[in-house]
């Protein structure tokens, strides 16, 4: 048998395996979409109007104290609005913030990583922007919320979205980016980020999805614009290290959370 024929058979076999793998992955994502084990409505407790007459869902966590309180727009990881982000919203509310954990996927949520990646890749950015902006408008109009003291906090996918909210909203009074992989490193593209409040970026030293040189370039862009900021890189941890479970024990997650609380207290109280 000639080398050319062997090569062709091997190539066809590889293509077949790739195709089979794609079919399996596509099937899993489709099954999770059609028969989800959880829905955004399982976690949301408020609704408000979005663009084009749609109804948006979110989770609102309110502090025990009364009077004008600062507000937080909280943006979930790539999995969507779920129990983890609700726990973080409740923890922030305990610190005196009115927190709106928004839904960036219009009702979709998942526990599967591949489906989460699919949602990130297939949800139009303009749609995400519009829905987060609608959440911001809703939060500013809530009784008992001081509209001049609204900050954004986001994790992973949400960290990128918190950054982008600051880039288009000059009224945002604080911005916390937890390992957002879509860092903008060109100062000419950062828009109004940091215009009305400081920026905090928190990253893991061993995060394989966000090279440290990209973090450094993001920091340089903030410096070039004269933005009040702080960037912290936590040693020994990778991506998505601030989980509700990790927050219950001493370590990097607790330290990063406490750093965020000190930052927000200084910026919004």
Image (cartoon, grey):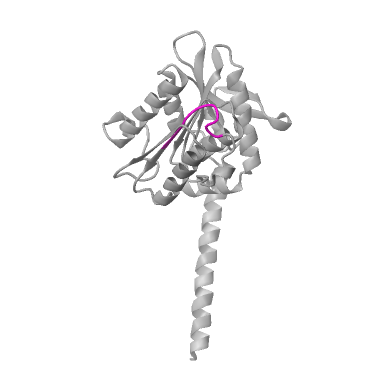
Q: Residue furthest right?
A: 52
In depth, the one of 233 and 61 nearer the eye is 233
Q: Can the viewer see residue 78?
A: no
At 29% across and 45% down in the image, what residue appears? 236
Dominant SS in magenta: loop
- Residue 151 is a magenta residue: no
Q: Which residues are magenta?
A: 193-201
At 60% across and 27% down in the image, what residue appears? 135
Q: Quadrant of residue 48?
A: top right
Q: Quadrant of residue 54?
A: top right
Q: Position of residue 65 (x, y in %)?
A: 45, 9
Q: Position of residue 115 (x, y in %)?
A: 52, 47
Above or below, 178 relative to 86: below
Q: Position of residue 77 (x, y in %)?
A: 48, 38
Above or below, 248 relative to 223: above
Q: Position of residue 201 (x, y in %)?
A: 43, 37
Horizontally, is 24 left or right of 92 in the view?
A: right
At 55% across and 45% down in the image, what residue appears? 120
- Residue 194 is a magenta residue: yes
Horizontally, is 25 left or right of 246 in the view?
A: right
Horizontally, is 80 left or right of 94 in the view?
A: right
In depth, the one of 158 and 211 nearer the eye is 211
Q: Can the viewer see residue 235?
A: yes
In depth, the one of 50 and 21 nearer the eye is 50
Q: Quadrant of the C terminus?
A: top left
Q: Residue furthest bottom?
A: 1
Q: Residue furthest top?
A: 67
């Amino acid at each position: 048998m000639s080398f050319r024929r062997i090569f062709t058979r091997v190539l066809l076999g590889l293509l077949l395996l790739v195709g089979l793998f794609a079919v399996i992955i596509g099937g899993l994502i489709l099954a999770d979409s059609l028969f989800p084990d959880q829905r955004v409505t399982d976690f949301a407790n408020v609704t408000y109007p979005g663009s084009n007459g749609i109804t948006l869902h979110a989770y609102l966590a309110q502090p025990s104290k009364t009077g004008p309180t600062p507000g937080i727009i909280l943006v979930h990881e790539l999995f969507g609005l779920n129990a983890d982000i609700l726990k973080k919203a409740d923890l922030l509310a305990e610190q005196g913030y009115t927190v709106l954990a928004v839904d960036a996927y219009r009702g979709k949520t998942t526990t599967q990583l591949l489906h989460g990646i699919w949602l990130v890749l297939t949800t139009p950015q303009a749609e995400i922007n519009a829905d987060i902006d609608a959440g911001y408008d809703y939060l500013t109009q809530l009784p008992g919320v001081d509209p001049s003291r609204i900050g954004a906090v986001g994790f992973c996918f949400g960290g990128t979205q918190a950054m982008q909210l600051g880039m288009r909203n000059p009224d945002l009074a604080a911005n916390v980016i937890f390992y957002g992989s879509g860092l903008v490193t060109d100062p000419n593209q950062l828009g109004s980020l940091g215009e009305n409040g400081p920026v905090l970026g928190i990253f893991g030293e061993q995060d394989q999805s966000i090279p440290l040189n990209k973090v450094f370039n993001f920091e340089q862009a903030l410096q070039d614009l004269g933005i009040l900021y702080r960037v912290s890189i936590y040693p020994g941890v990778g991506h998505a290290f601030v989980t509700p479970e990790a927050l219950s024990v001493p370590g990097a997650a607790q330290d990063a959370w406490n750093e965020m609380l000190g930052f927000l207290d200084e910026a919004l109280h």
